Image (tube, helix red, strand yellow):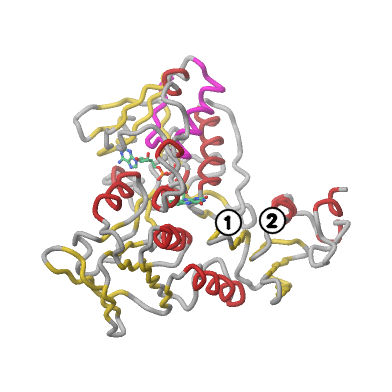
Amino acid sequence: MRYVIIGTSAAGLTAAETVRQFDRQGELILISDEALRPYSRPMLTYLLGREAGLENIWLRPPSHFHKLNFKAMLGEPVAQVDPQAREVYLSGGRVVKYDRLLIASGAQPRMLGIPGETLAGVFTLRRLADWQKLEADLPAGATMAIVGAGPIGLKAAEALRRRGHRVILVEAEPRPLPRLLDDTAAKLLQEHLHGLGAELIVKARPAAISGHQGRVRSLALADGRELEVEGVLLAVGVRPRLEFLHGTPLAGNAPLTVNSFLQTQYPDIFAAGDCAEAPDLFSGKPVSYQIWPAAVAQGQVAGANMTGASRRYSGLLAQNSISLHGFKIVSGGILEPGPNLTEVWCRFDERQGVYRRLVFQEGCLVGVTLAGEVTDAGLYFQIMTQKLPVKDLPVDPRSPDFHPGKVWG
Ligand SMILES: Cc1cc2nc3c(=O)[nH]c(=O)nc-3n(C[C@H](O)[C@H](O)[C@H](O)COP(=O)(O)OP(=O)(O)OC[C@H]3O[C@@H](n4cnc5c(N)ncnc54)[C@H](O)[C@@H]3O)c2cc1C
């Protein structure tokens, strides 16, 4: 059996290791356009803030691939996949045949499509090479605009403040982390952003980046304001990397929709991680969370199923945890009230700066936001994942008495 995996990050690496648990003999080929052994993308903002060094980012020791008998084709972009011929074409001209293929090609930063995005001083942060570019091109003390106050924009803001940059966050929505927080939690976060010394402009859309002698000089907003900046970091989300499916029946389906065995419409082609859309824990509908734990969980299931096991992916809770300048936020599950939601419960302790927001649906806890105090987050997530009815819990999650000892004895 020949297994081929495109991508050597969270999903691809986990899948390869899982294949080896089931099949010690099969040929296992890992392909990546990055000429690097697997590393942690979440560590990139810590590298940027100089809180971590390169030695902290590697996921496995250099001997790992050899030890598990993986054949690695690193620094080799995939140009095309042919599902009929069961072949992968590399842009260098080589052809790799497969019996089972996993597409774990992740995602790349979304661009805004505004003038000036190719100027020197415009950055994204997804790959180690992006961090290297920032290190090489970022003038010391430069004023930076960060477009997007999502998790990566905020962590990058913290990192750049640590390096002494003036930082202006530009967010299109009325609050930071707009998809994760309501107004109360966002207000708390804004106070901490202020403490960090980062400026935040909300309800603002970039219109153009202007330059002088090829370098960024300002960022113009759609409302006419012009921010004088020397660098722009775009952190406006990602889009799946599936360009090599061009011309196949899988093209145009981005992210790639998979069934609960993580198979695409071709039973011998699997997909996992940021490039895939797998059934949600609650709704069963295809969703793409684009978070590390989801990529790992899907890599485990896909890897097992590639060898012929019959593992069902049960879905994952959407979850995010962010620590910004010592202020912690955890949110997950269903956050937006829908038609079947029976209750959204909130408690705000203004003096302590602690906020809890719980969403209940049909007698079960389905969503949680914790800000300022997150120690019991794991407990809420267990209750949600196991879909435990609130009436069967020894303590109601709304009670001030709610803590692990009371719930699990
Ligand atoms: C700065 C940053 C911070 C983050 N912080 C967090 C966090 O705190 N918590 C969290 O849960 N998630 C975080 N994430 C998101 C997390 O990193 C991703 O969800 C995760 O990396 C997805 O893993 P993946 O294996 O699906 O894809 P990726 O990590 O994107 O890897 C895809 C792989 O495919 C390869 N590839 C793609 N196209 C081709 C091609 N054509 N040919 C050959 N190879 C190809 C790539 O080189 C790469 O090896 C962060 C991401 C970033 C960028």
Neighbour tally class for label 2: few under 14, some 14-19, many 20 plus, Cα within 10 Å: some
Residue 406: x and y, percent? 86, 54
Res. 124 image quadrant: bottom left
Q: Which residues are magenta?
A: 1-24
Q: Quadrant of the N terminus?
A: top left
**In the depicted view, which residue is nearer to us: 343 or 217?**
217
Q: Is residue 10 magenta?
A: yes
**In the depicted view, which residue is nearer to us: 362 or 349?**
349
Mark 2 and mark 1 residues within 8 Å of each other at the beta carbon: yes
Tell me: 347 left or right of 178: right
Res. 75 image quadrant: top left
User: Gap in Å between the C-alphas at discs 2 and 1?
Assistant: 10 Å
Q: Secondary structure at mark 1?
A: strand
User: Would you name the residue on which mark 1 appears?
Assistant: 321
Q: Is residue 371 magenta?
A: no
Q: Is residue 350 above or below residue 35?
A: below
Q: Residue at x 68, y 69 (%)?
A: 354
Q: Residue at x 51, y 41 (%)?
A: 262
